[in-house]
Each structure stands twice: as C-alpha cells, then as structure tokens.
Amino acid sequence: MVIDITDVTPLFIWLLGPEWTEGRLFHPLPLTVFLLLLIAGLSWLVVRLRKGHGSTDRGAARAIGGGSAAAIVLIALGIIAWKLLLLGKAEEIAWTLTLADFAEGLRNSCFKGLQWLLGSGWHQGALYWWFLVIISAAAAVFVLGWLAVALRRGPIKALETSGRAIGDCALDIIRISPRRVGALAGLGIKESIRRRVVVVFAVFILILLFAGWFLDPGSIDPARLYLNFVLTTTGYLVILLLLFLSSLSLPADIKSRTLHTIVTKPVRSSEVVLGRIAGFTAVATCLLLIMGVISYFFVERGLAHTHKVDADSLKTVEYAAGRPTGRQGLTTRVHEHRHKVVVDPSGNGRVEMEQGHRHDLKGDWKELLSKESAGKKYQLGQPEGMLLARVPVYGKLTFRDREGKPTDKGINVGDEWTYRSYIEGGSLAAAVWTFQGITEKRFPAGLPVDMILGIFRTHKGNIEKGVTGSLLLRNPRDGSDVKPTEVEIFESKEFQIDNRLIPREVRTPDGKKVDLFKEFVSDGEVEIWLRCVDMAQYFGVAQADMYLRAHNASFAWNFAKGYFGIWLLGLLVITLGVLFSTFLSGPVAVLATFGALLGGLFHDFMFRLATHQTYGGGPFESIVRILTQQNVTSEMEPGLRTTVVQTLDQPAAFGLWLLAAVLPDLSRFNVFSKCVAYGFNIPGDTILTYTCRTFAFVLPLFVAAYLCLKNREVAR
Amino acid sequence: MQSEIIIETRNLTKVYRDFWGRQKVRALKALDLEIRRGEIFGLLGPNGSGKTTTIKLLLGLLFPTAGQALVFGRDAREVTKNERIGYLPEESYLYRFLNAEETLDFYGRLFNMPRAVRRQRVADLIEMVGLDWAKRRQLKEYSKGMTRRIGLAQALINDPELIVLDEPTTGLDPIGTREMKDLIIKLRDEGKTVLLCSHLLADVQDVCDRIAILYQGEMKEMGRVDSLLKVQDVTEIRVTGLSAIGQEEVKRAIEHNNGHVLNIGNPTTTLEDLFLKIIRESEEHPGRRVRGVVEKT
C-alpha cells in the first residue's frame, strides 16, 4: 500500500470536519481539553515572558520572532491552500479581505446571540474575519519589512531582522507594565486638566442655560427633542475635545522634548501609546459621567410639568337615559398642550395621552362626580410615560389585500419613500403581524400593543378626528377559513406612538368570554391583525411599526447606555488621534484625525461612491457636472472630456474604496442616541456588538501606533 | 571589574536626511569609543561637533545610519538597558505643571518602583539636591538652577550605574557648579560611570578622567586628561626661597645658588589652550586626526 504523505487533506477533514464543525476536534471532550491546554499554554508563556529580565530579551525576542514569523507564513499558506484545495475554486478566493468585510459580517449577522461573533461552526463569524484581516495585514507588513531590509542587507539578514522585530513587538506588548501605564495615564489626565478641559464644562453649562430659550416643550414629542439635544451636544463637545487632546499631546511632548526624559527610562513605546489612550479615555469617562448626570437632570426638569383640572369646566355626560352620569373636559394648558379628562359614572377616571405622556390625579376621581367638587381645582401629578425605555418584541409582517387574500405588500399610495405599505379602509385589507415567544408569564395582563401608523386620507373628513381602525386576533394554527376576532376599535393618532392593551379576557363574536392565551396563542405564536375601518382612508405600516411592549426597562440605565455609545465613539477617536500623533506633527495630526472622523461618519456614502452605486460619477465627473450644470442622472456626452474625467475617477474610486475599507463606520454609532431619544431600550446584543466592533478597530490601531512610535527617532 | 566596558561604539555614523532622503548633514563620522566602568568620561567639542548626537544615539533617541552603539553590551535601541541609566538632558525637559515630588514620583513609577521605595527615594533625592523647601511648588515657578537640580534628581531616581549628563553645570551658580562637580566625583567614587559633555572646559578639566574631543563629527583626540595636558618637550622646575641674585643667575645654574628644587617635571597647559589648538589645527588640515598637537607647543 502506498501512502501519499503529501496529502494531508483527509487528516484535516478528520480533525476539523468538512465545514469546520463536525470534526473530532469539536467533540465536547477533546474541544474542552484542547481549549484548556491552549489557555494554560498561553498563560504560562505570558507569565514566563513577563517575568523575563533584560538579559533574556534577545533570546526571547528571537524565539518569539522566529515562531511568529513561521506561524504567520504557515497560516497565510494554510488559508490559501485551504481555499484552493478544499473549495477547488480559485476564482472564489476572497482576495479583498478588509475591515469592511468584517463590519459587513457584523452587520449581516447581528442580533443572533453570539453567532455573529463565532459564525456557524467556527468560521464565517466576525471573529474569523477579524483574525483573517489581522493576519493578512501582519503578513503584508512582514513581507514589506523583509523586502525593505533585504534590498540593503540581503535576504537572510532581512529574515533575521524582520523576525526579531516581530519578537520585540510581541515582548513589548506582553511586558506592558500596569504601573508605568498608570503613571503615563495619570500624566495624560493632569495634562488634560492643564489644557483647561474644564472650559468644555463651562461651554456645556452655557449651552444648556440658553437651550431653555430654544427647546420647545410644547412640540409633538418634547422628550425626543430634549434627549436628542443633550446627546448630540455632549457627543459633539466630547468628541471634538478628545480629537484635539489626543492628536496634540504627543507632538507637544516631542516638541518640548519632555518625551526625551520618558523614553530614556525603561518605558516601552507600547506603554507610551497605551498610557495616552488610557489617560484620555479616563478623561472622557469622567467628562461623560458628569455631563450625563447634568443632562439627565436638565431633561427631567425641562419636561416636568403638571396640569390642573377645573371641576367647573367638566361637562356632565349621560351614557344612558336615567343612569348615573359621568363627566369629561380638558385640563389647564401647560407646555402648549391640554389633556382630555374622562370620569365614567362608576368614578373611574383617566387623563388621555397627549405629547406621548399622561398624568394621574392626586386624589380620588370619585370626588369629581360629587357636588363638593364645585369651584375646586384639582392638581394632576408629574408626566408619566414620557421618559421610557421600551423593550419591544417585534413580529413578522404580512399583508391581506382588499379581498382578504394574502399578499406580500400593501398598496403604494404614491409616496417616494417606500418604507411603509398601505392598507385600504372599509375593506378586508389588513396588515398581519405574527409574534413569537408570547407566554402568559411574559404578558400576564394581556398584550400591550404599541403602534406608529402612517395615515393617508383621500378625503378630508373630520380633520380633528383620527381615522378609525381595529385590532383583531387570530390563532396562527387555525385554518385559512377561520376569521380573526375583533378585540379593539381605536381612533388613530398621527406622528406618535399609540399604545393599546389587548386584555387577557376577550369577547368572541358570539358573546363568549375566552382567555387570550388559550384561544389565540399556539406554541407562543399569535397573529395580530390591523384594519382600517373608515372608507377610502388608508393606514401605512412597516414591520417595525407595531410591536408588543414586553416591559419598560429603567430609563436612567438606558440613558447611561446612550452615553456608553458616545464613550465607545470617543475611544475610537482617541486611538485614531494617538495613532496619527505618533508620526505627524500636531496640526497635521488634528487634520488627519478629523478627516478620519468625517470619513467614518460618511462611510456608507464613500463606499457607495467607490463602488459606483451613486448617481453623478466620481469626484472628477461631479466637478464637471457642477461646472457645466448637468443633471446627475443623465449620461455624460461621449468625448475626450468624458473619457479623461472618468479615467481620473478610477484611481480616485480605488482610493476611496481603500479608505472605506480601513475606516470604521462611525455613523452607525448613532443607534445608541436614537434608541434613547425614541424611547427604546438598547439591547445587550447591540452593546456587545458595538463594543466588539470598537475594540476590533482599537486593537490593531494601538499596535499600528506602537510600531510607528517605536520606529520614530524621537529626538529628530 | 574595573575594566568592564560600559559604552562601546563601533564605526558609529549618523547622517541627517531631509524628507526626500537627500543627505543634509553628516553629524557623526565613524566614531569608535570605549568607556569603562567607574570612569568619568567627557565629550568635548564646539557647537555642531556631534556631542549631543552621540549621546542621543547612545540613549536610543536617534538611530545610527551605520555602525553600532552598545550600552552594557546591548544595542542602544533596547529599552531594558535604560533600567541602569540616568540621563540629565541639556535643558531639564520636565513637565512644568508637576511639582518636585510629583515629578520624581512619576519618574519613579516609570522604573516600576513600589510605592514605599519610591516615597523614600523621592524624599532622599529632594533633600540631596536641596529643594526640600520648594518641593510642593510647580516646576514652572522654579529658577533655572532649581530646575537643573530637580533634573539631576530625576536622573538619579533609579540609582543608575551609568549617568549621562548633557551640560550638567549650565545655569548653575558658582556654588551650584562646585556642588555638581563634587557630586560627579562622588558618583565615580561610588563605582558609577559618568559620561558628560560640556562647553565649560574648566569643569571638564576638573572632573574628567578621560576625554574625547569631537570636531565636525569626527573624533580628534582621546585620552586621559592628565596625559593629554602634559607638555612633553618642556621641563618645569619649580623653586622656592630664591634670592634676587639667584634669580639673575638662575639661567646659568640653579644648583649654584642654594635653591631647593621642589619639583622637576612636565608643565601642563590648560584644557582651553589644548582645545583651541586642536580646533585650529583641524581647520588648517580638515579630515586629519590631530596628533602631537601638544608636543609642538
């Protein structure tokens, strides 16, 4: 028997499995042992290396360097071989591995537990792509470094030098001393204070003082307005401050030569970089903590108000002849709005929702029905439901046409924005949401439904009155002939979230009272139908326009999460600033960081521009179109000019693509402030995703900054 | 071991280039140097002669264009060598918003010193440089002399084996200068190695065991101070109690006039004379190592 020892593919398949999921290695016991051994081995190595002294540096650096260089080459070769041999499709090799791929991987696989991070099996997850990108970048740097040295000193010497450089790099990172980093971070904090960081507080307080003049508490959603304002102001102020602090600090130290007395101590370049990042991050943390507390009280105080109910202004309402009467009317006008007050004959009163909130009466509603209330004014409590952190449960949306038949989409009423699809009033047309995971334990009181409806009127009707709609329930397991049961009729509210509670006890068309969970919920699934009742009026809906509110999370905690989003963005800006300041002079570093920040904020646009997904061509074609006042959608006239500008646009597009591939997509970080402003809880998944995304950039940026500083002549 | 080599440079060359890689200045040309443990070594030279460049290359602040700089037998770019080095720069480049205690504590932390050790060392050094009365004042309020003293204290925070001093007496008053020179000698007596560069030739002459004279990036002379300053072809006879008549006859024969010969040896010139002669000679014969300048005088 001849054994072909060059073919190791079967061994890999035996060990890892064809999809890297079913191999022997991934059986629970071997996997646990393997991981434990790996962790123990790495820990032992790190401890050994951290304990090492000067005299062992050279040997350790050589060993690590040689090992790492070999590992990088082997892994790079392995990836290529794996792609070529196992897939057998050379053309499908992803040669264009970029950080954007990593971001894309994250984007496509968010909110699925940790699957987005680890992938299905052990590959195709974000972590896999990240490692691939990092290893590719490291291999590219290694090869370039080797080439540069090889040209001067020959290939063997170059290999030794490059290997030792990797070893030094690994040692400089492993042997980072917390005490030294702490000292340098403390210095960064003191320097920030010396640079009058306090001025930012003064500006912030000043802005808040004058904001009261411009923020209108009488707007449709004042909470959103206030929250957007404080989060945006804090974000801009802190990010700008961090941008200047981080990009000017090192160049200032190099210029004043104070860095000379630091780098002539046993301080590694990695510690200098990490110290700066840690120091400015600490400054950012303190700033955001203090600004967050001030903002929280500013919002709460700015939105706080009460109304009074003048008992004499309430009208008596007769529900049935000869029966007891109720009363209804309006509260006093405060913050440009009034609430409708309704007291039913049995003395149950409520204040209707207005501007996204309602109030409660301080006292007994029954008193308002009695004669003793004459001439009295009753005080309402503070607004409720204004500052919320809703935890939504989203469903899947399908449609029924005007004859009740299933369809993918509703009607397009001519809106350019096709986000919402419309259902026709007075017909069998309906929007149907199927919710999963619905249990009695989760919703003990019934199903709290939140709706945001778009309304399209084909006739004015009573413009003061909303369009009437109805909510219906249906068991998804029922046959198609079973009609849904109407449980609620309501009057729509435009431009705000309308919340309704479908109670546990539901009355069926034949008058029977049934339990919602027993009748309509099967395996945790329920269908909620929305219909428009008024003829010739339309409701516009999208999937996210109706959700069940599982519960409300703590607003203060959600507010803190919003600030955490700014903190993450700040950390990225600090790292970028420190990176640029290691090889650029102060003003240029500021400009470069600002450019990177802008590039990150317009990341999507840049990517679309680079991949020719926008109208009007690249930068040069756009200039020509602006100068000649041409429409962006019309084709350029063929000719020399068109050929020249379009040829010039090719390298520009490549440059943009490269930038977009390297820069983080910063515009996505506004999901934090949006969630807080719109009153939705920021899920843990989102926080984890964005934290990973931030550190996925911070770590390589830190290593790049360290390498730049290490190879810079500080005294030049 | 007295002869252990602490600093060694082999063919050390530094060329400054501009942004485009074109050669601007050849700051140091093939410097070969050896400094042994326990000696005070002085680097002398006019402005732009390459003294500070040499020191910066030895400290890893600059990278050599060619050649090698070894400190404690290790490449000058290695960080760990700095654990045994103290450096006082030309001007004390310290953080002016820190006070004396904070400054020394900060540098102590950079040496990974535990808090208790740091505290003791900071107190000792502040007392040694005589700044106990101003230890809580920010450095921006310090005079130049006080800043030099705190700069010296930070250079000694780690009790270094090698001390590199760039113009150590600049900005000090005569008493401060004397104290600095005494301290340098004291450090040598404790077995430490001192490398200093200075323009003040009298200071160098007072304290250095060996010197090297640099001019336009090249080493022109190196050796022990006493032997370099010895004028070989002149005999000096110092006498005392010589009468007026004897003075008249001294040219004929000293012994015939009852004079008591105290010393017969070689007179020395001043370092300043030597230095100026070497520079003059170098200008007359550029590129040639100066030899025997002293003999000709």
Image (cartoon, helix red, strand yellow):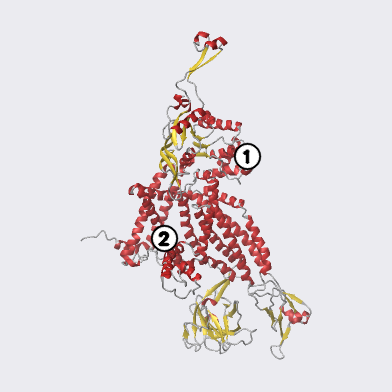
Question: Is A275 rendered above or below residue B143?
Answer: below
Quadrant location, the N terminus of chain A: bottom left
Please tell me whether mark 2 or mark 1 is closer to you in this view. Answer: 1
Query: Quadrant of the rendered structure where residue A233 is?
Result: bottom right
User: Are there few (<14), some (14-19), or many (20+) residues within 10 Å of tag 2?
Assistant: some
- Tell me if B190 is positioned left or right of A223 in this view: left
Residue A404 to residue A173: above or below: below
Q: Is residue A168 left or right of residue A3?
A: right
Q: Residue at x 68, y 63 (%)?
A: A209
Residue A383 image point, x, y percent: 67, 72
The answer to whether one can see residue B36 in this image is no
- Which residue is drawn at the image coordinates 40% and 47% (left, top)? A61
Q: Nearer the viewer, residue A102 or A643?
A: A643
Question: SS class of the residue under badge 1?
Answer: loop
Q: Secondary structure at mark 2?
A: helix
In the image, what residue type sits under mark 1? Ser
Q: Residue furthest left?
A: A1
Look at label 2 and name its amino acid.
Answer: Val
Q: Residue at x 61, y 43 (%)?
A: B139
**Residue B70 on image: x %, y %:** 42, 39
Which label number is shown at residue B212?
A: none
Judging depth in this view, the residue of A246 and B30 nearest the camera is: B30
Q: Residues within 10 Å of mark 1 (few under 14, many from 20)?
A: few
Q: Can residue A432 be seen here?
A: yes
Q: CA distance from mark 2 to mark 1?
A: 54 Å
Residue at image mark 1? B143
> Which quadrant of the view contains residue A234?
bottom right
Give the image location of residue B46, x and y in percent. 50, 35
Confirm whether circles 2 and 1 share one chain. Answer: no
Subunit ID for the residue under disc 1: B
Residue behind mark 2? A133
Provide residue A496's location: percent of width, then percent of height.
Answer: 60, 77
